[in-house]
Amino acid sequence: MGKKILAVYFSQSGQTRAIVESFLRPVVTDGSEVEYLQIKTVHQFPFPWSVPVFFDTVPESVNIIPTTLEPWQTKLERYDLVILGWQPWNLSPSIPFSSILQDEKFKALIKGTPVITISGCRNMWINAQEKNKKLLQAAGARLVGNIALVDRHLNHLSYFTIFHWLGTGRKDRKWGIFPKPGVSEKDISGASKFGNVVNNYLRLNNWEGLQQDLSQIGATPVKYSLMFIERKAGKIFQKWVDLINKFPQKRKNILVVYKYYLAVALLVASPIILAVDFVLFRPFSQKKIRRQMQYYKGVEYRERI
């Protein structure tokens, strides 16, 4: 008898929906029934959107402050598996996604239920997934798997291409010379390989070892340089948000300064900091680094690692 699966997602461009559909293709082929639930919010997040509007999401996304959801309903009260399709905003889960994870009705729906998170992002998803883990733990859900599809191009290149995509809504080559932004079509269609692995565990209703198998075929790519930058940046982002909360009347001006700070920090400061770390610290921290990378590839949640 086929399993009952709920696929919950938020998507502006359609990329996340395409990833989830590709991922679930083997499960559907095997006879399981998938119900899709699109997250919709009362406040509309435009796409494409202007740079000022995008940066205005920083305080609420970093502090995972929920926004009001439009009414939603599911066919069943309980599912064999829940798939959560999401994307990071500002090193945090997007506001619509974090909002449904804090919705009392949804928390009751996923309590005690196996959950798999699957994301499409530029390249930094670690901090956001840690916040997801905490919210899922608070909801009493069982996080059994995580998959992160990323833009495989260089960090500096994808910084420019992502804003091209966000600002124009076009997933094409900026000026005809930059690579295409976002997760590649090849990787989106290839998400079915993770679905094949999940389907084997779904048949048995035994999730022990799933994440390890997913990681072995590339489900959770963790690069040291990005992990290093993201861990540092997460703390810095929070300081900026604290400053905005302290001076709310100056929010717009602070966000303008933050926008330029972010560009300089990513494009200029981070390569220098990484070079210093490579010479002075990284050679002497290999055991700790391996432990951190292994943790982020998994689904366990710990306050400190």
Image: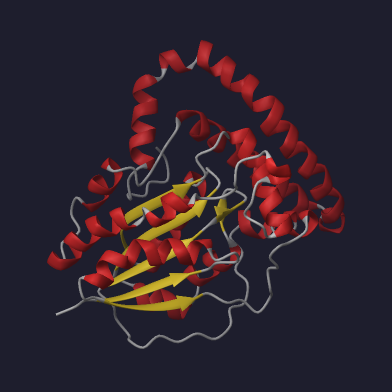
Colour mapping used in the image:
secondary structure
Foreground residue, 131 or 190?
190
The quarter of the rendered structure image containing the C terminus is: top left
Is residue 221 in view from this perspective? yes
Place of residue 147 in the rendered image (x, y in percent of width and height, measured from the top left): 38, 52
Name, please, the residue furthest toward the top. Answer: 279
Which residue is located at x 50 percent, y 40 percent?
152
Position above or below: 303 against 197: above
Place of residue 115 in the rendered image (x, y in percent of width and height, measured from the top left): 33, 64
The quarter of the rendered structure image containing the N terminus is: bottom left
Q: Quadrant of residue 135?
A: bottom left
- Figure disc tally: 0
Which residue is located at x 26 percent, y 68 percent?
27
Position above or below: 287 against 220: above
Task: Judge from the rendering whether residue 108 lies leftward or rightward of residue 185; answer left or right.
Answer: left
Foreground residue, 278 or 302?
278
Place of residue 72 in the rendered image (x, y in percent of width and height, measured from the top left): 50, 85
Foreground residue, 250 or 18?
18
Task: Judge from the rendering whether residue 176 lies leftward or rightward of residue 182; answer left or right.
Answer: right
Place of residue 203 in the rendered image (x, y in percent of width and height, measured from the top left): 15, 67
Name, please, the residue furthest toward the front. Answer: 176
Task: Judge from the rendering whether residue 217 lies leftward or rightward of residue 222; answer left or right.
Answer: left
Is residue 141 in view from this perspective? no
